Image (tube, rainbow, N blue to C red):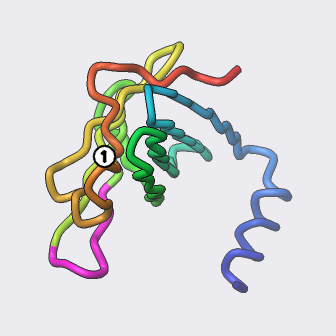
Amino acid sequence: MKKSLFLTIALLVSGNVSAATDHYVLRDGDYVRHLKVTKISDDYSVDADVDFDSAADGAHCSEAISGKAKSTGENELLLKKHSESAASFCELKIKLSPNGAKIEESKDCSSFTVNKCHFSSGDKELVKVK
């Protein structure tokens, strides 16, 4: 708590720190995916969530993952999160474009989600909210 308070005050006092947050959304059938990417100086944090709600069979789920991400190339981020219940990592590879983002997930992300929920957007791009 003290660390967060100190960091917040330091960011407010510092005039050299630039921060930007971008939101991306994709509604695809029964799925809604949301991605939030925050950049403070050269540090990235990512929040990704997926909601699935099927009116046909009543199935639903809602999952989220967040953490610090590393830049792995131009307009590419990697979020690597350790599972608390298994000895595995979920990796989200995020490719950003001027108008959107695509998410690919590793196979070990299944330990973070239930059957129908997955973070991957496939070939579809999440649209950048302006």
Where in the figure is residue 14, as x and y percent of width and height? 79, 54
Q: Quadrant of the C terminus?
A: top right
Q: Image check: 94 left or right of 104?
A: right
Hey, what amino acid is under mark 1? Answer: Leu
Against 94, residue 91 (above or below) is below
- Residue ID for mark 1: 92
| Magenta span includes 91 | no
Q: Residue furthest bottom?
A: 2
Q: What residue sits 70% from the left and 40% below the top?
A: 18
The quarter of the displayed image where residue 71 is located? top left
Q: Quadrant of the N terminus?
A: bottom right
Where in the figure is residue 122, as x and y percent of width and height? 27, 27
The quarter of the displayed image where residue 41 is located? top right
Where disc 1 sits, the SS reads strand
Q: Which residues are magenta?
A: 80-87
Q: What residue sits 17% from the left and 58% below the top?
A: 108
Q: Image check: 89 left or right of 12?
A: left
Against 90, residue 83 (above or below) is below
The quarter of the displayed image where residue 86 is located? bottom left
Against 89, residue 19 (above or below) is above
Where in the figure is residue 116, as x and y percent of width and height? 30, 49
Q: Residue furthest right?
A: 13
Residue nearest the viewer, comparing 127 with 118: 118
What secondary structure characterizes most of the magenta part?
loop
Where in the figure is residue 6, as x and y percent of width and height? 75, 75
Q: What residue sits 31% from the left and 64% below the top?
A: 112
| Magenta span includes 86 | yes
